[in-house]
Image: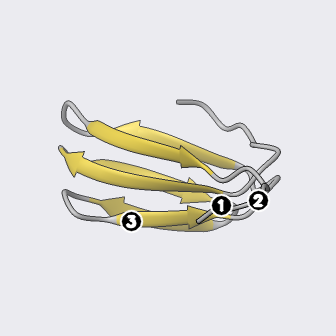
Amino acid sequence: LSEHTAAMPAIMHFLSGEADVTLGSDKIAAAPGCWVHMPPHMPHSIHAKTPVVMLLLLLKPGVVKS
């Protein structure tokens, strides 16, 4: 994925495969089990080195009901 931003905080959880993740000026080597937190409006990109399965969680503000 080329560089882009998201309007809300997000978490990427890498389930399989390997990728290079860029967050602003930081670079992370992501592998299975890696979690990456991104604040809103942080420029980021992902370059898959192998086929990757990733869970993306977009954290919308809201009310939690119990």
State the mark number for residue 35: 3
Q: Position of residue 52 (x, y in %)?
A: 25, 36
Does the CB distance between marks 2 and 1 fall below 8 Å? yes
Q: Position of residue 46 (x, y in %)?
A: 48, 42
Q: Amino acid at mark 1?
A: Lys
Determine the CA span between mark 3 and mark 2. 24 Å
Dot 3 or dot 2: first in sequence order is 3
Question: Residue tagged by mark 2?
Answer: 63
For residue 50, side relative to residue 9 (left or right): left
Q: Position of residue 48 (x, y in %)?
A: 33, 37
- Kindly state the secondary structure of the residue where label 2 is placed: loop
Of marks 3 and 2, the one in the foreground: 2
Quadrant in the rendering for residue 33:
bottom left
For residue 62, side relative to residue 32 (left or right): right
In-front residue for pair 60/6: 60
Which residue is painted at 82% across and 45% down in the image? 7
- Kindly state the secondary structure of the residue where label 1 is placed: loop
